Image (tube, helix red, strand yellow):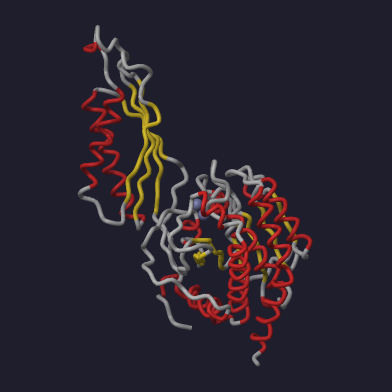
Amino acid sequence: MQDIERLKIKICDHIDNLAPELIELSRTIHGQPELAFEETKASHCLSSFLKKHGFSCQPGVGEMPTAFIAGYPPHSTKRPTVAFLAEYDALPNLGHACGHNLIAAASAGAAVGLCSCLFEQWGRIAVLGTPAEEGGGGKIKLINKGLFNNLDVALMFHPDSKTQLVKRALAMVALEVNFHGQAAHAAAAPHEGRNALDAVIMSFNNINSLRQQIRDDARIHGIITHGGEAPNIIPHFAAARFMVRALDNTYLQQLLARVIDCFKAAAQASCTRLELKQDELSYAAFKPNYGLVELFRPNLKSLGLRETPGSELANIGSSDIGNVSRLLPSLHANIAICPADLSIHTPEFANAAISDFGQRRMLLAAKALSLTALDLLYYPECLKGVKQEFEGGGHNTL
Ligand SMILES: [Zn+2]
Ligand SMILES: [Zn+2]
């Protein structure tokens, strides 16, 4: 048996031994759901687990109290560094309906599993605690603060209803749209008013016309957040929020310009003033790294899990992992934790994220991530191939 096969068995045994702790970790995070940037307890229990198993841990990185970076060997700056990303924020009202408790436990388990057989000369393992994936773009903030600068590869899994190793993510910008008009009595003096609500309604209609001429992979959707005070007052202020998404960043910018024209046209027609605010954190489209997928796939298969056939473009949203994938080779593998007809962001999915089946899949994900990281550190040519693909050299089968 090759040395690496022995090491892989050792890693899996180690993760099996860690299982009670990892399940406890995932259940604890699930049982006390915390929203974006408020994940104090989740961040603390993950850091404590990693420190207990020999990692050095720096809390509050990137000027976010609930972000952290942990490393093994402790305080090492050795390269290459393979990073496991841990998400742990929950959704309003739904709790862990995106299963981030399982992501956190799997990434922590993968890291501790691997450190049991890491030779220091190979490199370093990091766990990056990334808050606020569900709106807030925690990873983008960490990128802007340089936390990804000394990492070579980013690995994570995401719970899903299907096992798909490549699932794309759309580039996305969020907009806040305010219209300022003139209030007037709606019956006695409507001619003195300028109707801000009309501007919002026209914006929706303009966008619905534009929608016929946009690419299939683009999305524009919004809500009205303020529509006036009373039906007998011409609304002097009305507001909406929109999201614009596309499969590539270039088309997103072109589409965004046309959406903004829809708002401008509405303002002109209603004689109101447009005030537009673009969220400073734009989500980038996910850039898959097929070299990483081809390392991950046989590891997953060796653990007995097969992929669900399907398009990498089906049922896709947006995530801040997109921005990470533009900076360094990234794996964001989806693994089924429930029947295929369930959707994420539902109460049923929150139940799946605490189920025994969900916990077993979390342990399996931890193993597959850990084994893939071992491949990257054990075979320098694997890491080189993954990086060449990232740099634009195309994907070579390793
Ligand atoms: Zn989600
Ligand atoms: Zn999620």
Q: Position of residue 301 (x, y in %)?
A: 53, 79
When asked about the image quadrant of residue 256, the answer is top left
Number of numbered markers: 0
Whether residue 107 sits left or right of residue 201 in the image: it is right
Whether residue 275 sits left or right of residue 266 in the image: it is right
Where 349 sits versus 177, above or below? below
Q: Residue at x 35, y 57 (%)?
A: 247
Q: Position of residue 168 (x, y in %)?
A: 41, 62
Q: Residue at x 58, y 67 (%)?
A: 361
Whether residue 270 sits left or right of residue 134 in the image: it is left
Q: Position of residue 170 (x, y in %)?
A: 39, 55
Furthest-bottom residue in this view:
1
Q: Residue at x 61, y 52 (%)?
A: 88
Where 362 sits versus 282, above or below? below
Where 200 sits versus 340, above or below? above
When asked about the image quadrant of residue 85, the answer is bottom right
Closest to the observer: 177 or 88?
88
Whether residue 392 sits left or right of residue 18 in the image: it is left
For the N terminus, give its image quadrant. bottom right
Q: Position of residue 303 (x, y in %)?
A: 58, 78
When asked about the image quadrant of residue 58, the answer is bottom right
Furthest-top residue in this view:
188
Where 163 sits versus 264, above or below? below
Closest to the observer: 120 or 66?
66
